[in-house]
Amino acid sequence: RDWSSDVCSSDLAPVAKDLFSQWRAIVGDTVADNVTPVRLERGVLTVEVVENAWATQLKFLERQLLNTLREHVGDVVDSLEVKVRRSR
């Protein structure tokens, strides 16, 4: 996937591209199978989840996920914005 089209053009673009391309390695298979990073802008990582249950799950995992992200990419992600993927 070409992440460059999904992220905003800013100083964070290289970090976001690395984060998005390494997403599975950073968050693990279970989370990666259900949660997709969409955009990183002004410290907010927007992710898309497969269903409402995962939106709820991320509320419980948010602190742990943010800590894991900081370990891998530094202090560029302050919070998550969760969106449920629309059915096609």
Image (cartoon, rainbow, N blue to C red):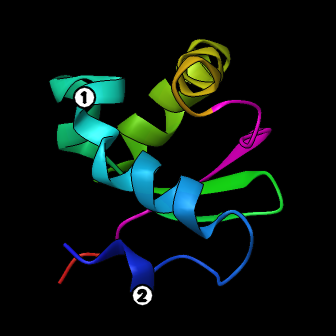
- Image x and y of residue 28, in percent: 24, 22
Whether residue 49 is visible, yes or no, is no
Q: Residue at x 65, y 84 (%)?
A: 9
Q: Residue at x 30, y 53 (%)?
A: 21
Q: Residue 11, relative to residue 59: is it above or below? A: below
- Image x and y of residue 19, in percent: 45, 47
- Image x and y of residue 79, in percent: 76, 40
Can you say which quadrant of the picture contains the C terminus?
bottom left
Residue bearing mark 1: 25
Q: Is residue 58 left or right of residue 5?
A: right
Front residue of this view, candidates 73 and 27: 73
Q: Please, what secondary structure does the residue beneath circle 1 have? A: helix
Q: Residue 38, relative to residue 51: is it above or below? A: below
Range covered by the magenta-colored residues: 74-85
Residue 7 shown in magenta: no
Q: Residue 64, relative to residue 86: is it above or below? A: above
Q: Is residue 11 left or right of residue 58?
A: right
Residue bearing mark 2: 5
Amino acid beneath label 2: Ser
